[in-house]
Amino acid sequence: MKFKAFLTDNGISLLEKRFLPALDKMGKICHLYLTRDHAFFLHNLLNGDGIQSIAQFRKEALFDDYRISSQNEDRIAFAVDLSLLHRALRSVVTIYAEFGADGGAAAVPPSNRLQIKLVKKLPPHSQQAMPFLTFETKGYKSAVIQDVPISKPLSRTDVLELQAALDSAQDLPQTLVQVPDMNQLQTFVDRMKHVGDPISMSISKCGDLHLQISTTLITLGAEFRKLLVIGEKAQVPAEDRNLTAQSRSERAILRGDAMSVQVSVKHFSKSLQCHLAKPDCAFYGIAPQGACLTVIFQFFIPGTHQTDKSISLHCRLPVLDPGSG
């Protein structure tokens, strides 16, 4: 079982400044899953407990000279502590940056690029070799090697289970609505945290997103209307246009034009932390039979409005009831 590659400057920036800070908010431990063509960071796909997050990168988005081999169709997966991974990457980037101080990235000699690889080492005071994910680079006056401890790589059976869970998690809701202003949503949810739990969310094919928390003393809600809809769409009936947000939502659910679920405020707030990965917009949808709430983050190729298909990130929030609609 072997893995070795060089991180590109774009890959370093994506991981260090954007994705690792965002993914660390989802949960401290995740699976890093490497295949011939992709690298995945996966939260909770095997245990199904808590929010699931799936970050996927084509190998070219992160790596150069990418080499992987295993007896399991060149697939390797292991658990890693994201805070340790982030700290190690920041440390070696400091040394790596010595080269770019005057001459930019082009000043980095090919032999001294930032390498990442799987190794087995004997830790201090131990008699058994342990697996590590190692970063290595050299500066003008110093060199640095950072070893990140990882779990024993997953067995063939566990990798197959992880792949099956990943395939299942790629299913999209039939209706998705776009929420372009993540900051507005974050502000509202921050206020909701102090009211109670859970949060009820309904999404309609008309492009309405309705959020509400109710207690015996207070009800707090918000509505986002006329959002961009992808997938199954519907028009708001004329007789519904002047109704309250709650009435419109209830009538849309009865017509089959909307679905509603309840999710934990904590999980919903965690999913919003993905804004640290700097997505360009986000889409919300409810899976068939109200199985989960899905949040899909979209990234554009810099300077364009074209989707960057080399990167994807989405979350699946467990529901606290079977949903309606």
Image (spheres, grey):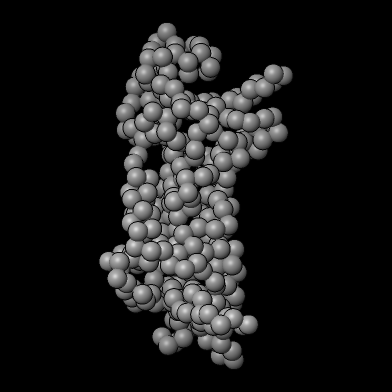
Can residue 17 be seen here? The reply is no
Question: Is 161 in front, or is 107?
Answer: 161
Residue 98 on image: x %, y %: 57, 82
Q: Most extreme residue toward the left, as rendered? A: 73
Residue 140 is drawn in which quadrant?
Answer: bottom right
Report the side of 322 relative to 157 (left or right): right
Which percent across, then down, holds residue 197?
A: 63, 31
Q: Looking at the image, which residue is at 32% across and 72% down?
A: 70
- Residue 255's spot in the image, x, y percent? 37, 14
Residue 15 in the figure: left or right of residue 205 = right
Q: Is residue 313 above or below residue 113?
A: above
Q: Is residue 98 above or below residue 262?
A: below
When asked about the image quadrant of residue 285, the answer is top left
Looking at the image, the residue that sits furthest to the bottom is 141
Quadrant that contains the N terminus:
bottom left
Q: Number of marks in the image?
A: 0
Query: Considering the image in quadrants, where does the C terminus appear?
Result: top left
Query: In terms of image quadrants, where is residue 217?
Result: top right
Closer to us: 165 or 124: 124
Task: Tell me if residue 264 can be seen.
Answer: yes
- Residue in the picture at 44% in, 39% down: 294
Residue reaching furthest to the front: 127
Q: Viewed as shown, does residue 280 lie left or right of 173?
A: right
Residue at 46 percent of width and 59 percent of height? 31
Residue at point 55%, 77% (across, down) = 147
Image position, residue 180 (x, y; %) = 48, 39
